[in-house]
Image (tube, grey):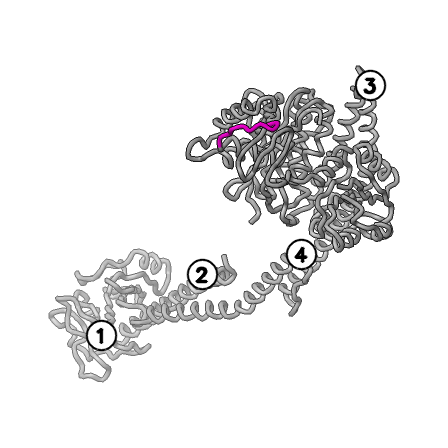
Amino acid sequence: MKLRARLALVVLVTALPVIGGIVFLQQRMQWSAAEQSLADYALDRMQGGGREACEIAPEAFPLWQGGRQPERGPERLPGPRGAPPRPRLGGPPDPLQRGPEVPPRGPAEPINPDVRTELWAYAPDFTSRNREAPTFPGEVREALLAGESHASVEWFVPERNGIAVGVRMPWDSGPCAFILVRRSRVSPPGAQRDLLIGTATLLAVLLGAVMVGAGPVVARVRRLTAQVRASAAARYATPAEVSGSDEITDLARAFNSAADEVRGSIETIENRERTLRQFLENTTHDVMVPLTVLQGHLTALRRRFENAQGEERGVVLEALQEAHYMASLIHNLSAAARLESGKVELERHRVDLAALVERAVARHAPIARARGLALEHAVPPEPVATSGDVTLLEQAVSNLIHNAVRYVEPGGHVAVVLEAREGRFALRVLDDGPGIPAELRSRVFERAFRADGARSRHPDGLGLGLSIARDVLERHGFELELRQPSERGTEFEIRGPLAS
Amino acid sequence: MSHRILVVEDDPKLGLQITQHLKEAGFEPHWLERGDAALAVEPRDYALVILDLMLPGAFGLDVLKHLRRHSDLPVLVLSAKNDTAVKVRALELGADDYVTKPFWPEELLARVTARLRRPALARNGTISFGGLELDVDGRTLKVDGAPIELTRVEFEMLLALARRPGQALSRAWLAENVLDPERDGTERTLDVHVSRLRKKLGTRGALVATVWGVGYRLDAPEGT
């Protein structure tokens, strides 16, 4: 939920009960004011001549004012004050003509044709001599019996909120000891509507104020968000702007100190990584030269024992393979270091694939020959080039060839074939070795996986080489497929686009 | 062609070993340990240069630039750092190929011979190989002097193989480039043509070798 919406919701949730409370209180006050005024009015009227009229003809005593009268009811009460006296009291036989009209006294009651006021008289036992009198409301009776001078209850008039007030007269006997005053409307017309409009206006003003007041805050929060995003994108090199002196300023400061720490950590990690890579490169270089010399000596030894029989020849072959394995391990380690050094973009250059195949085959040909395998290859006479990192691609191809050369038995074959057709190249490395069992084929590219632990003394050797091959080709967007052409044998195929 | 090879390598043991292996393979190596010494050599005296890139006295890449400025002598770079940028730079500066350390002596020799290998040039329009004489323009073949009738496909196949003796061609390449696509463009018919060709070549038929998993190759006749 957005900040503004949340604020608006909070305003609504807090303001509505308050407004409701105010409206309720206002109506209560209106009610008790109406009750008091009607009680006063009743007393006034009864003491100002009404009692006499009532006691003379209690069976015809209703006193009316305003509004429509009941069908059989008597004439209206007088209109505006000062109008010629007219019969005030209802009742068909007109019993009230006897005395002069009782002028309304006490609280001036504005005469509204829409508001009807009735006075009914009751004996101390709450019965009326007038047969048309309404039943005295029970609640009011209870309150009066309990000693109250007056009490009220709602009077249900269609579409209006009427009030009925029972009033104890200062005399306790006679047919007019209690008066029930009923008025058809408590509040003046339009009061409800005005209240509603006022409340709505208040709410709207409140909401508007909140929206306007939240504007600058929202804008600052948005600006800070944009700055934090920009900073994160720039590896936390740019701090967020700190302005003002409120919670948003604190937030900006907190972000800046967090960014400082993150930047520090990044730098530490990068330094460590740089040092490690430098160390690896130097070590690699330092190992490469002696290893080359060692390979030279081993080659000389192999020649010397070429015609020898038995143990010596086997020992030399073992030594050759170990040296070869070490060399490939070093190449794979530096390839792995480069592949895992993060999201560094590949350096892409034009790569002559025919030369790459010939180099990779030449690297493994001495071992293949020493092991008694045929390592063959073919490249098209036309140039075949793609785009990529030549070191990584050569290592990938070399790993596939090395894998074949290691597992094919003496007398077996390994072939590397490069072909180009319709803008794409295919590079196949196939052998007639024991092959990889179907259930293990999907796993051979997993790091540290070997098809059979007993086949090699080099733990992780195959896993590293093949997983690096897969990673390298994936990074290039090339495809790598593993097939088993027949019962025996393995075929890897790399496919990718030719360089334009 | 001269068989003199200039070796520029600062490591004494490795330099010694390389020169020994070159000698055993029939080349005449000339070994320099310093880069600045290599800047003074006369390129025309050599058939090929083996150049280490990390040298005292001068950067290997500067030696390469110097050599390229004066000749198109084949240069084989020895790279110890398995660094793509260095290799790419060396190739851009005109190196012909590179060998990454550590390497086997045979590996280095294979790269040297590959660099010195020239495609079989047709002298007077004729390619000669192991008793075969192919008249490229006339599309005729003589085996040990005697003319042999070949079909168009047979001649094209023999010619393709003879242009790069010792190097195999894949079945797919031969099928695509030699077979008549309208008549028999599939790899399966290739073997039929090859066996007919071998029969026609008689005693020289063994020159056309089947290469496992690959295709065919014109092998050097035994004893040569």
Tell me the number on the disc at residue A235.
4
Vertical position of residue A256 compared to residue B105: above or below:
below
* C-beta proximity under 8 Å, tags 3 and 2: no
Closer to us: mark 3 or mark 2? 3
Left or right? Give the position of A40 relative to A249.
left
Quarter assignment of residue A147: bottom left
Residue indicated by mark 3: A312
Instruction: Identify which residue is drawn at 53% across, 26% down.
Output: B197
From which residue to which does the magenta span run? B143-151
Label 3, residues with CA under 10 Å away: few <14, some 14-19, many ≥20: some
Instruction: Identify which residue is drawn at 21% across, 79% down.
Output: A79
Instruction: Identify which residue is drawn at 20% across, 68% down.
Output: A62
Disc nearer the start of the sequence (4/2): 2
Mark 2 element type: helix
**Residue B131: percent from left, percent from top:** 63, 28
Determine the chain carrying the residue at label 2.
Answer: A
Q: Marks 3 and 1, Cα distance to the nearest angstrom?
A: 133 Å
Q: Marks 4 and 2, Cα distance to the nearest angstrom?
A: 50 Å
Disc nearer the start of the sequence (1/4): 1
Residue indicated by mark 2: A17
Disc nearer the start of the sequence (3/2): 2
Residue indicated by mark 1: A113
* C-beta proximity under 8 Å, tags 1 and 4: no
Mark 3 element type: helix
Disc nearer the start of the sequence (4/3): 4
Compare residues A298 and A205 and report the one nearer the observer: A298
Left or right? Give the position of B133 relative to B113.
left
* C-beta proximity under 8 Å, tags 3 and 1: no
